[in-house]
Amino acid sequence: MSDRPTLDDIRRAPKVLLHDHLDGGVRPATIVDLARETGYGDLPTMDADNLRTWFTEASNSGSLERYLETFSHTVGVMQSAEALSRVAYECAEDLAKDGVVYAEVRYAPEQHVSAGLTLEQVVEAVLDGFARGRREHGIRVGALVTAMRHQARSMEIAELAVRYRDAGVVGFDIAGAEAGYPPTRHLDAFEYLQRENAHFTIHAGEGFGLPSIWQAIQWCGADRLGHGVRIIDDIEVDGGTPRLGRLADYVRDKRIPLEMCPTSNIQTGAAKSIEEHPIGLLRRLSFRVTVNTDNRLMSGTTLSEEFAKLVDAFGYGWDDLQWFTVNAMKSAFAPFTDRLELINGVIKPGFAQLKWSGARPLA
Ligand SMILES: O=c1[nH]cnc2c1ncn2[C@@H]1O[C@H](CO)[C@@H](O)[C@H]1O
Ligand SMILES: [Zn+2]
């Protein structure tokens, strides 16, 4: 059996993606097209290839705040229903071509109303694009609506999540600069969602450390953590057996899913390199780790490429990749029966086939 998956093999594996930003994965050619159509004049270049390079280079600053600056260009061209539907459809298509079978894709509706759309029109346009993606490519994409943590619209966005929960919005999130904007700033929104039995994840432990993770879980009641890499600060690794502090213990005991995004973390300075990324230790300690892309455009990546980098850095084999994938499916906000159906009917058989098709005859 071949136990060193290649990038090509990984592309064929049925994968699950929980943390991917719609405005962080727009095709460069589409950004140029939309800029022309809408008269958006601020792009650094109108050449799609150069634009692709510009985004990845501009995102390598080592600071989350600087990393977030490039989003003004993608958000800038996503201000009409047509543009939003197109970007959502292309996102579903690109993920399907990468072998993703289930995805949760997030974006902040409040950032797409500057040309006059209502929040509802924004949500409906994106759902239309995802629905077309499912019809044409079979991929299931649920939307997560994000509130920007430095703004004050989280309650409205939480209400939007509840209003559209049966139409394809599977949950809620907060994103944006983390330092100075703790999760508790939006406590009313999280308490409302809990009363409504709704699901949410919180970007925490990326640009700021343990207090942010602690608030996200113990004050706000997050179902999952966006990134959560800094939970490593509560694990002592000097010498022999790693020692977990109370928060790290809690996260592991409660099986709180960590939506890890290795390449993005290196760009924002949350991790030094893939080899030193906390995912290696957290996987060994059996935290509920999942692997994600965050922003495919800014990070110049795909889910398969994130996995391939981890294979190179940590020597992971098919069993590890399947473990990450099943973790992700278990942690999804889709209904339990859908999750089971995908794990037993799609993921396990798909990985089994790949494991065995790599089998070589004994010499
Ligand atoms: O890694 C991240 N950390 C925090 N915020 C982010 C990250 N990636 C993207 N966004 C923010 O989320 C908004 C909605 O999708 C984006 O516009 C960006 O500002
Ligand atoms: Zn993110």
Image (cartoon, helix red, strand yellow):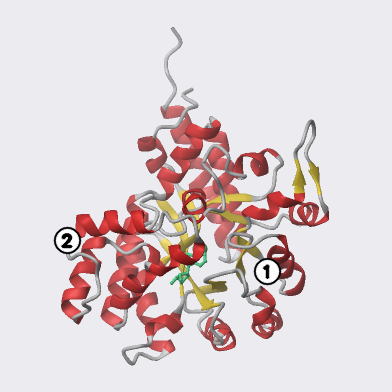
Q: Can residue 193 be seen in this view?
A: no
Per the image, label 2 sits on a secondary structure element best described as loop
Q: In which quarter of the image is residue 123?
A: bottom left
| Contact (Cβ within 8 Å) of mark 2 with mark 1 | no
Whether ligand 1 has any atom under 8 Å from the Cβ at mark 2 is answered as no
View extreme (right): residue = 246
**Helix, strand or loop under label 1:** loop
Mark 2 vs 1, N-terminal side: 2
Q: Is ligand 2 less than 8 Å from the beta carbon at label 1? A: no
- Expressed as whole percent of the image width and height from the top left, the position of residue 288 reads 66, 50
Residue at mark 1 = 222
What residue is rendered at 43% in x and 54% in y? 101
Residue at 42% in and 14% down: 361
Q: Which of 211 and 117 is in front in this view?
A: 211
Which mark, residue 47? 2
Q: What residue type is labelled 1?
A: Ala
Does residue 262 show up? yes
Q: Where is residue 290 in the image (x, y as percent from the top left)?
A: 57, 51
Residue placed at 59% from the left, 87% from the top? 155
Q: Which of 245 and 350 is in front in this view?
A: 245
Q: Quadrant of residue 298?
A: bottom left
At label 2, counting other C-alpha atoms closer than 10 Å, the crowd grade (few under 14, some 14-19, many 20 or more) is: few
Q: Does residue 25 appear left or right of residue 146 in this picture? A: left
Rendered position, 232 above or below 276 = below
